[in-house]
Image: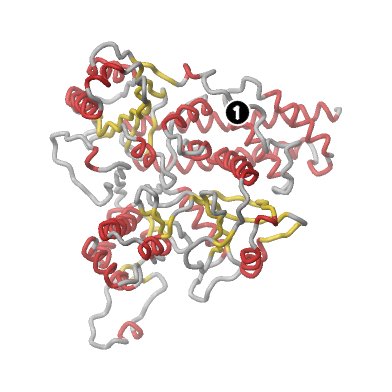
Amino acid sequence: MAEHDIAQKVAYQIISGFDKSYRWYSRITRGAQERFEQAQWAATHQAVKERIAIYEQSLADVVAEIYQQIFPHQQDMAFWQSLKQHYAKLLDNHPQFELAETFLNSVIGRVFRHQKIDDSVMFVLPSRCFLPGQDRDKVIFSFDTTGTVRDMYEQIFHTYRFNVPFEDKQRDIQNLDARLRERLNREQLASVTAVEILKPVFYRGKAAYLIGHICMPCETLPFVIALQMSEQRQLFVDALLTDRKDLSVIFGFARSYFMADTQYPAEIVAFLQTLLPNKKHFELYMALGFYKHGKTVFYRNFLQHLQESDDKFEAAPGIRGLVMAVFHLPSYGVVFKIIKDEFAESKKITREHVKECYKLVKMSDRVGRMADTHEYVNFTLPRERISDDLLDELLATCASSIEINGDEVVIKHLYIERKMTPLNLYLQQEQDGEKIRHALDELGLCIKQIALANIFPGDMLHKNFGITKHGRVIFYDYDEICFMHQRNFRELPKSDDPYALDTLSVAPDDVFPEQFEHFIVGKREFKDILKSLHPELMQPDYWRDIQRRVAAGEIQNFTPYASCKRFDRGVSEKVTASHD
């Protein structure tokens, strides 16, 4: 068979592998509605993990097929260039063309161990410019606004059908009607030209969201209906959200990926971008669960930013880590983390353990409290953009991960994470007592909510937490995390002997919560505030109770908006620390 024909055949194998993978992905995503309706919360969490794992399995299958056809490393560059050309033709009119581009990139990366980043054989740059709107009618429902507000809501709930009854549909419509009238005056309501909602329902955790916007002549507002399921498996509307800040938090980088079934992801992302103009494209793809393509879009965005800026990479602000070297480009909104070659004596862990911890977070419900991280191999930076001090530090601490090739520095393995202000720096610099109190309250809530999600943070020093521009505290240091059942929470011995703890038999998994106050935050005034707001954190019984709840399969409802946004349902509700 001619080389041209072989390249064409392999290109077809790759696109077929992608299509099979996307069908698999979509099947799990479509199942979100039934899991939500049946209140199958454990199955919901399992589906999240299964969907993340699909990509690597599909990639491995395709690469194995290719090796059955050819010896990849015996092919010359012309072969791979021809393959890309054939593949690009297969993407014409493909509804997920951009995701398929990333799939080819992954295949090339796997075959060449990520050492061939070349646009002539892969899609470093996109194959074409996507123009939003060509498939807009396939992802949007438009609702009649010429009647009453209640009529519009009736239309919405006639369009979005669920196989369970409403707890009280008329109450919910009344709540929605009243809330919209609080947000818009009579003149604004009369000026509404359109209400458009994305066709896919966005499922995550114990909630479902209808996401759209209200169009008026002078402004456009987000329009998000948040739905939940009662203990009696009846549907109810929990909130109407019309502020971009609320929507931004719902799509936050510390939350699990949505299940939103669509065949037109680029069109969905384009619509979401109009609602969240401050979110980057790669963040929205990741929020939809397309984390691999999100990495591709991030890299393209990063290359563009390098061309448009001239500042240098330098060590990130904050206390140097014992396990990770962390640096950033001051003008760009992420940090780069490299595992050090050697750890401090206090860290009884291995490099592989650190990788497993980061993978565990990826697969867990991050509950809005653990930053999403993205793993890269052979990530290339221009040498001239790295400060001498930083390069010296990286070569001294991470030499096995660094390779200098002429004017390029290749980082063999790193993680990328959203940039935040380290909490210890924030507390040092902030003068406003109310903001300090809020940050410490957030710190306590962050620790509690992570624990309720079955993760023990391990190293809870406040330097391992960041605070966002919205004032939300997020955990980002994962090298000592574990499941809750893997720790034994104990009381300190009662003794007048100050050295009693030294003589106590302490197992590696023993934890003494009464000591937490001495190291979570430093200053006495901060300790006192944290203890007053969250005294339970220092009580072993509290942690053992969480262990029991998690072991019993209790799954919390982590609502990503303030409790004041929630509607009064006229029923008694159990309020837990899991609610924001």
Residue occupying the point 63% across, 65% down: 394
- Camera-side residue: 290 or 398? 398
Q: Is residue 496 left or right of residue 127?
A: left
Specify whether residue 51 is in view.
no
Q: Quadrant of residue 250?
A: top left
- Camera-side residue: 203 or 185? 185
Give the x, y percent position of residue 410. Answer: 69, 55
* Rendered-image quadrant of the N terminus: top right
Give the x, y percent position of residue 225. Answer: 30, 29
Residue occupying the point 48% across, 41% down: 50
The amino acid marked with disc number 1 is: Asp
Task: Please give the count of numbered marks on the rendered protein.
Answer: 1
Task: Tell me the residue that label 1 is attached to.
Answer: 19
Residue furthest to the right: 2
- Camera-side residue: 213 or 137? 213
Asked if 333 appears above or below 178 in the picture, the reply is below
Q: Quadrant of residue 448?
A: bottom left
Specify whether residue 273 is in view.
yes
